[in-house]
């Protein structure tokens, strides 16, 4: 099985190129991939999403107040490396893994994808457990930490069900051993590397040090402002109020209410935009596939109960539920993702149920049954790949709507405070006055991203439509 | 070979009084009896053909062997399916396939009893290469490495006469023709060396020349691998060429059971006779082809007095009301090795109500000559 379907997941996009340049994919999925890649809408949409992925992965490299390397007080050090967070490290390592796997052209796309998914989920799990452990040790807050672990575990489950399991069961013993050992090595190293930046970051120290001529030389990122660098020193140093400055050369998109650089916040906000879309939709798709699949396969009373569950869940107003959750449990991005995911599975479940109701009568499912194939293998190996395509289309629209939901919440002032998000920047635009950058750039980013996901979904729908197939 | 430890006279599989029902169409309608007291037995290396029209319970009986009837809506009302004889070790209930758990069944399915289906076009999963599909079956049932499984799959494809099996393994089902796909299905079914192959109308969807090739192939593989075949078909030509023993089914019951020559030369049951009469004969011009039973499509419509031929006063003619053949109708061994569904008039005739068991195989030369 070659999973070269250009799924909207950002990590898949590097592999897309490998699938599309093949002379003639013979599998159905390969052909769909070819038809998909041939549409301009898909290319434009994917290009934008890939740009966002790159921005999200390289955000600390692009915009950070910390110098990469500097020599201060006669000592060479790397404040950038010291302030690298676990999330930064996971993203960069995962991207590096994807790049390394891209080189192994001899291995099938599916196997590489599985290896990548496995390594990334392992890294994420290590990071999650690590930060949860720290949270519990410091007794700071066990709520969000545990939710985070839950989210990551669900992600790993999704990855295992959709990508790793079918391919891992088809992989050779030596390949499994190699990938497993590499994973253990990277994961173990990551555990002991102890990626924990200092709790209190003083961003102005670099500018103050430079002004005091204590710095011999330093290498700064292209945009020398971290998203949470509120330039507290600006007033005393230059006499200019750093808040709500319109776009200038030093701040290409101006500054926000707190005095932070808008471009820097925009770049770092791509992470939240991508994460909320992918994780919330991922949870929804995983739940939808599981519930819908069981409903469709067993039919009868399982289906009856499932459909009542669907009706109950489709009656929940998500925005109001989210506002209520924020009121009770505070602002928490992961809780937000879980809520959007847990309430959003209904559409996917209905699609998968309809597909499975049709597929369970197919001869090859009967044949697999007559061959002594165990139930989970029939469900997820034989039926799911044949019925998952409409869900993929729906999922790309689901990602767009999850991004919109988060933006709406942030715009209402119920989103995150410290962490940058596009909706939160847009919220500030109401009070921005001359700072037109706060209106235009986050608004455009939200619009383009939702538009891009819709283009991808539209292109995928056309590519999967059997009537458009020759 | 696993069959060799069986005594020749022990049937490989015995179906006793199998009854399977489905819910009726209406709300208060009685359950439809898809199989109604089916008795069958298959001996090692034997080909048993089950003939009958659509809905007569052929497929239901075969699928019951592998517990493939979804329950609900279906239900196994009565009966047992004895695998490899009760005397062959194991306790009394241990060999009843209907009492097997799902886990036990998985060891039977594909491993000891394999099945091939009517529609080769839809019987292969479109998203996997045929190599992956054959290997999955092999890896499920045999403890072999992947490279060994590839070799087994390649050999299986070679066995069914597919040229260049190594490269065919990497192809997807849509790249193969119908006959090729049916060959792949057979290769998949036989990769695990089953002792019994359930062939559910294996050639119906194929054109005539391919049909002949596939049947030839099945005969060849049966000889090579010493397996039994349960051949379900409504093509009497296929039966005449391939079967050793024939069971004619109608309305969920077996109406006649005997050697293939007996059934074709001296059919006794009116349904069998109707079935044979309804076959068009090459070169004979007729205005209307005969139907199996004039005007009678459901058992209720049968006129009384469908007598068993030759008229034997020991047996009652069978009436068509209610349960087909009546409640007292049983399979009677009216002539030696020839069972017919009818009701006995006298006690000595009633003693002939035995389970149909016929350890008979056509000499392979005969089969080779006819093909």
Image (cartoon, rainbow, N blue to C red):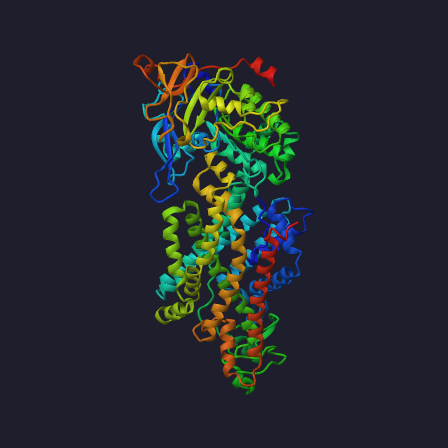
Residue B95: percent from left, percent from top: 36, 25
Q: Quadrant of residue B218?
A: top right
Image x and y of residue A198, in percent: 46, 68
Farthest residue to the bottom: give it.
A239
Asked if residue A165 shows in the view, the reply is no
Residue in view at x 37 percent, y 48 percent: A302
Q: Residue at x 61, y 15 (%)?
A: B369
Name the spot of residue B275 as percent of width and height, x first: 50, 25
Question: In the displayed structure, would residue B309 be above or below residue A15?
Answer: above
* Camera-nearest residue between B235 and B243: B235
Q: Looking at the image, how many numbered discs can be counted on the residues?
A: 0
Q: Nearer the viewer, residue A89 or A210?
A: A89
Looking at this view, name the residue that lies furthest to the left: B347
Up-down: is B170 above or below A434? above
The spot of residue A367 in percent (x, y) is 50, 36
Q: In the rendered view, would you say B195 is above or below B169?
A: above
In this rendering, does residue B278 appear at all?
A: yes
Identify the residue at the far right of this view. Answer: A23
Quadrant containing the C terminus of chain B in the rendered view: top right
Q: Is residue B138 left or right of residue A141?
A: right
Along the line of sight, which residue is nearer the eye, B45 or B52? B52
């Amino acid at each position: 099985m070659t999973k070269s379907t250009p799924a909207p997941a950002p990590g898949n996009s590097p592999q897309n190129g490998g699938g599309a340049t093949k002379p003639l994919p013979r599998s159905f999925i390969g052909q769909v991939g070819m038809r998909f890649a041939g549409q301009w809408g898909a290319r434009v949409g994917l290009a934008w999403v890939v740009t966002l992925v790159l921005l999200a992965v390289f955000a600390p490299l692009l915009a950070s107040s910390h110098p990469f390397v500097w020599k201060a007080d006669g000592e060479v050090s790397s404040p950038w490396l010291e302030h690298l967070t676990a999330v930064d490290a996971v993203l960069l390592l995962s991207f590096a893994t994807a790049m390394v796997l891209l080189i192994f052209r001899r291995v099938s796309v599916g196997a590489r994808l599985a290896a990548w998914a496995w390594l990334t989920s392992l890294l994420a799990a290590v990071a999650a457990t690590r930060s949860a452990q720290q949270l519990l040790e410091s007794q700071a807050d066990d709520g969000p930490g545990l939710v985070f672990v839950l989210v990551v575990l669900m992600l790993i489950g999704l990855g295992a069900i959709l990508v790793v399991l079918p391919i891992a069961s088809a992989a050779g013993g030596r390949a499994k051993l190699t990938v497993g050992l590499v994973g253990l090595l990277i994961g173990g190293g990551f555990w002991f590397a102890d990626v924990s930046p200092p709790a209190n970051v003083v961003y102005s120290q670099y500018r103050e040090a430079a002004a005091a001529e204590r710095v011999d030389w330093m290498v700064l990122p292209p945009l020398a402002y971290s998203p949470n660098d509120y330039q507290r020193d600006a007033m005393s140093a230059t006499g200019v109020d750093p808040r709500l400055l319109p776009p200038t050369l030093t701040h290409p998109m101006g500054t926000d209410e707190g005095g932070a650089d808008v471009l820097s916040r925009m770049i770092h906000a791509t992470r939240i935009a991508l994460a909320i879309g992918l994780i919330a939709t991922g949870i929804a798709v995983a739940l939808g596939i599981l519930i819908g699949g069981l409903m469709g396969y067993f039919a009868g009373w399982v289906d009856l109960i499932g459909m009542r569950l669907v009706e109950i869940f489709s009656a929940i107003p998500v925005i109001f539920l989210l506002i209520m959750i924020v009121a009770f449990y505070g602002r928490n991005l992961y809780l937000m993702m879980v809520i959007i995911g847990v309430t959003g599975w209904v559409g996917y479940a209905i699609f998968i149920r309809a597909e499975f109701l049709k597929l369970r009568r197919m001869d090859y499912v009967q044949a697999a049954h007559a061959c002594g194939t165990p139930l989970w293998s029939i469900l997820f190996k034989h039926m799911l790949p044949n019925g998952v395509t409409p869900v993929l289309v729906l999922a790309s629209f689901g990602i767009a709507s999850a991004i919109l939901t988060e933006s709406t919440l942030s715009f209402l002032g119920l989103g995150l405070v410290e962490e940058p998000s596009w909706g939160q920047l847009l919220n500030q635009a109401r009070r921005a006055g001359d700072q037109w950058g706060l209106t235009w750039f986050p608004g455009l980013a939200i619009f383009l991203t939702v538009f891009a996901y819709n283009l991808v979904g539209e292109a995928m729908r056309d590519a999967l439509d059997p009537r458009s197939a020759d | 070979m696993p069959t060799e430890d069986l005594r020749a006279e022990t049937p490989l599989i015995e179906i006793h009084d199998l009854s399977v029902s489905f819910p009726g169409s209406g709300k208060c309608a009685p359950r439809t009896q898809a199989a109604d007291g089916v008795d069958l037995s298959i001996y090692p290396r034997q080909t048993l053909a089950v003939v009958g029209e659509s809905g007569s319970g052929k497929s239901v009986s075969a699928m019951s062997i592998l517990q493939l009837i979804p329950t609900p809506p279906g239900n196994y009302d009565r009966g047992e399916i004895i695998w490899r004889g009760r005397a062959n070790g194991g306790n009394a209930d241990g060999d009843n396939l209907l009492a097997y758990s799902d886990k036990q069944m998985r060891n039977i399915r594909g491993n000891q009893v394999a099945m091939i289906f009517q529609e080769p076009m839809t019987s292969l999963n479109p998203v996997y290469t045929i190599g992956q599909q054959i290997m999955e079956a092999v890896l499920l049932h045999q403890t072999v490495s992947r490279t060994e499984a590839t070799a087994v799959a390649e050999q299986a494809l070679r066995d069914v006469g597919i040229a260049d099996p190594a490269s065919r393994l990497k192809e997807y089902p849509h790249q193969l023709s119908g006959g090729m796909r049916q060959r792949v299905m057979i290769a998949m079914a036989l990769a695990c060396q089953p002792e019994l192959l359930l062939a559910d109308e294996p050639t119906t969807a194929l054109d005539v020349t391919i049909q002949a090739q596939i049947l030839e192939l099945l005969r060849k593989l049966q000889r090579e691998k010493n397996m039994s075949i349960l051949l379900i078909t409504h093509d009497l030509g296929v039966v005449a060429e391939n079967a050793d023993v024939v069971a004619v089914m109608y309305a969920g019951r077996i109406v006649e059971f005997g050697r293939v020559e007996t059934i074709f030369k001296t059919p006794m049951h009116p349904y069998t006779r109707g079935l044979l009469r309804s076959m068009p004969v090459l070169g004979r011009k007729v205005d209307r082809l005969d139907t199996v039973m004039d005007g009678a499509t459901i058992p209720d419509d049968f006129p009384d007095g469908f007598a068993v031929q030759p008229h034997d006063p020991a047996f009652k003619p069978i009436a068509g009301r209610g349960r087909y053949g009546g409640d007292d109708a049983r399979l009677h061994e009216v002539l030696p090795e020839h069972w017919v569904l009818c009701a006995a008039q006298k006690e000595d005739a009633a003693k002939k109500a035995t389970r149909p068991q016929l350890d008979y195989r056509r000499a392979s030369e005969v089969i080779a000559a006819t093909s």
